[in-house]
Image (cartoon, helix red, strand yellow):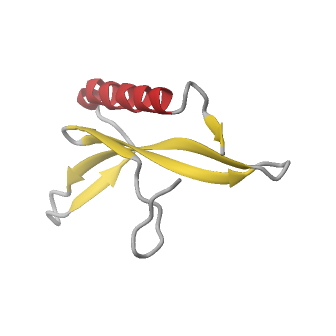
Amino acid sequence: MNETNELGKNLPEKKFRAGSISATIWRNNIKTKDGRDAEFMNVTFLRHYKDDKTEEWKTSNSLRTMDLPKAVVVLNKAYEYIVLNSQGDLAISM
């Protein structure tokens, strides 16, 4: 079951971060075509950076060459978490 905050928004299942690179896992519920409830996980991926002009923290889904090793690490961790927590299926019947 999804956890939600006080505004009813879906909270992340798990987050992996290596420096400025992060992968966040979300658990989602859907209705299948035959009316059953099903649950699945997906991953969002971001690079965090500080804007030189405004000094504000921002995010991007584009990577620099030096970000690639960290991206591999967080995406592998996310994949490992999903596989170990979904008995090998991408969608779980409820």
Nearer to us in this view, 15 or 2: 2
**Residue sitting at 64 percent across and 37 percent down?**
91
x and y percent of residue 75 in the render?
Answer: 39, 30
**Residue sitting at 40 percent across and 75 percent down?**
6
Left or right, 92 with reference to 36: left
Q: Residue furthest bottom?
A: 7
Q: Residue furthest right?
A: 34
x and y percent of residue 28 in the render?
Answer: 57, 51
Q: Quadrant of residue 58?
A: bottom left
**Residue sitting at 56 percent across and 24 percent down?**
88
**Residue sitting at 48 percent across and 72 percent down?**
8
Query: Is 55 located above or below residue 66 in the figure?
Result: below
Left or right, 64 with reference to 88: left
x and y percent of residue 7 in the render?
Answer: 43, 76
Left or right, 33 with reference to 31: right
Nearer to us in this view, 87 or 54: 87
Query: Is 32 located above or below residue 71 in the figure?
Result: below
